[in-house]
Amino acid sequence: MYNELNPLLLSQLRLAIMSHLMVVREADFSTLKEQTGATAGNLSAQITKLQEAGYIDVEKTYKNNYPLTLCRISPEGIAAFEAFYANLKTYFDSDNKP
């Protein structure tokens, strides 16, 4: 039996953001933009969706008089990502193959 995959994490960009944050735990907007290859507008929209779901925490501040947006993965985000990964693995489990 296949486990249901979290639809929020099925988006390629949201999955890329979460994957990066699982490794580094915190990244600024510019780094995420560079790592994902996303446009600023699309990245901003996807960060908002992840924030609204409680998967990441966003802090807006300034560094050297320039705006700085920091994204941190939350405990809920870690749990959601780990569950997504575990459920995805069921698709490759030999017990599920016809």
Image: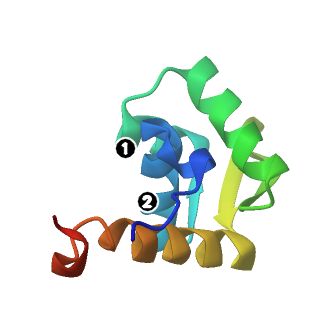
Q: Amino acid at mark 2?
A: His
Left or right of 90 in this view: 51: right
Decide: few, some or many residues near mark 1? Use Cα within 10 Å; few <14, some 14-19, many ≥20: few
Mark 1, residue position: 35
Decide: few, some or many residues near mark 2? Use Cα within 10 Å; few <14, some 14-19, many ≥20: some
The C terminus, quarter of image:
bottom left
Mark 2, residue position: 20
The N terminus, quarter of image:
bottom left
Total tally of numbered discs in the picture: 2
Measuring from the top left, give residue 84's x and y in whole percent.
Answer: 50, 67
Is label 1 in a helix, a strand or a loop? helix
Measuring from the top left, give residue 9's x and y in whole percent.
Answer: 54, 50
Please, is residue 40 above or below residue 47 in the view?
Answer: above
Q: Amino acid at mark 1?
A: Gln
Left or right of 36 in this view: 44: right
| Residue at left offset 40%, top offset 66% | 2
Is label 2 in a helix, a strand or a loop? helix
Q: Earlier in the sequence, mark 2 or mark 1?
A: 2
